[in-house]
Image (cartoon, coloured by chain):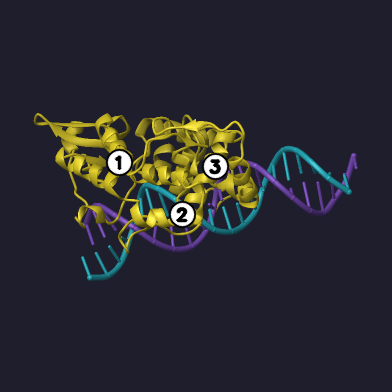
Chain colours: A yellow, B purple, C cyan
DNA sequence: AAGGACCGCAACCGCCGCGAG
DNA sequence: TCTCGCGGCGGTTGCGGTCCT
């Protein structure tokens, strides 16, 4: 099928997949508007991006969702819902449910997969499923150490830093390429979703309680502590993937005059600090799925 | 065996945020 | 400040396979 602009539509052929895969392997996941010409594909940029992210990208897990995955989807959907959720003390900041956020916590699953699964399965039976989950006899123990640590969340308004505008740092010199586009970075609160999840697990899926809790203390002292930690270390969370190894979710900082970065999920000091703050708010305990 | 109903999933569409100029 | 273009996302569509009668 060919669209009105002469661009091919419909199912991808094996030849097209090969061309796209080669192109992304050579040039990376960037500049999607250049991909069709680079790959020699008569496809629009969005179609190429979609095909790569949802089908061709390595490590994509296919097949049936496991019980644990379904459980997590149900719980996250219960938490975030198909509605706006107030996520901060600020009256101005609202966050929509993002399928990608749920998918990000399911290793190898894409947002499209999760969305399709939800639309075709769980929408109809979510109520009965959550009841089953809550009464499951062989419940599994989940602790703060074994839940998937969140990737940073992009915040438009950094209300929790007193409304500072998003800082911009240039790490172009990191790549040995002066023409490199600077990394846009921000001090997004890495603790948000962990704290929300903790509150959510503990609130036993009670909508009223969840909303009250989120509204009142989602970005409490743990978020503030994380912000202070990042500020005191003059570090920032990186939001855009960049060539040369620095990628979304890395913490960028200076040490002994050198620019450095590391994966936020590997920053033990930060996570210890956040968990310590959480522990002060509530006694340590396992969360039961 | 045939055909209609149903379902799952890949793909498309339209909108929005954001940076660049 | 405005416009444009790109990346990204969620909602929706439609094709193809499977099930049911």
Residue A275 on image: x %, y %: 31, 36
- Residue A47, given in percent of the width and then of the height, sits at 48, 46
The mark found on residue A209 in the picture is 2
Q: If you read the primary sequence from the N terminus, does the residue marked by circle 2 or circle 3 appear first?
A: 3
Determine which quarter of the picture holds residue A280: top left
SS class, disc 3:
helix
* A248 w.r.t. A93: above or below: above
Q: What's the mark number on residue A280?
A: 1
Q: CA distance from mark 2 to mark 3?
A: 30 Å
Q: Is residue A5 visible?
A: no
Residue ID for mark 3: A113
Q: Position of residue A116 (x, y in %)?
A: 58, 46
Please give left or right for residue A278 compared with residue A203 in the image. Answer: left
Q: Residue at x 55, y 45 (%)?
A: A74
Q: Residues within 10 Å of mark 3 (few under 14, many from 20)?
A: many
Chain letter for mark 3: A
Give the CA separation, mark 1 to mark 2: 20 Å
Q: Who is closer to the viewer here, B10 or A166?
A: A166
In the depicted structure, whether residue A14 falls above or below residue A196:
above
Asked whether the viewer can see residue A128, the reply is yes
| Chain letter of disc 1 in the image | A
Please name which of the two marks, 2 or 3, marks the residue nearer to the observer: 2
Q: Are marks 2 and 3 in contact (CB under 8 Å)?
A: no
């Amino acid at each position: 099928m060919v669209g009105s602009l002469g661009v091919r539509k419909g199912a991808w052929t094996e030849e097209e997949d090969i061309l796209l895969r080669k192109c992304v392997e050579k040039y990376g996941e960037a500049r999607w508007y250049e991909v069709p010409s680079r790959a020699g594909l008569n496809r629009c940029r969005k179609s190429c991006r979609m095909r790569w992210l949802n089908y061709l990208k390595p490590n994509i897990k296919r097949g049936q969702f496991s019980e644990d995955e379904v459980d997590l989807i149900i719980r996250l959907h219960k938490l975030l819902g198909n509605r706006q959720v107030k996520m901060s003390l600020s009256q101005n900041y609202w966050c929509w449910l993002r399928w990608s956020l749920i998918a990000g916590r399911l290793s190898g699953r894409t947002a499209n997969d999760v969305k399709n699964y939800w639309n075709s399965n769980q929408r109809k039976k979510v109520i009965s499923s959550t009841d089953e989950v809550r009464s499951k006899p062989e419940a599994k123990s989940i602790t703060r150490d074994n839940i998937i640590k969140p990737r940073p969340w992009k915040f438009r308004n950094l209300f929790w830093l007193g409304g500072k505008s998003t800082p911009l740092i240039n790490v172009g010199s990191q790549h040995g390429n002066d023409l490199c586009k600077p990394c846009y970075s921000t001090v997004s609160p890495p603790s948000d979703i962990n704290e929300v999840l903790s509150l959510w697990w503990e609130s036993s899926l009670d909508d009223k309680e969840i909303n009250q809790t989120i509204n009142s203390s989602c970005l409490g002292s743990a978020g503030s502590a994380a912000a202070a930690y990042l500020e005191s270390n003059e570090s920032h969370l990186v939001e855009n993937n960049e060539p040369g190894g620095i990628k979304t979710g890395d913490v960028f900082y200076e040490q002994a005059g050198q620019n450095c970065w590391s994966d936020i999920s590997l920053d033990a000091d930060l996570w210890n600090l956040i968990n310590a703050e959480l522990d002060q708010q509530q006694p340590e305990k396992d969360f039961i799925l």
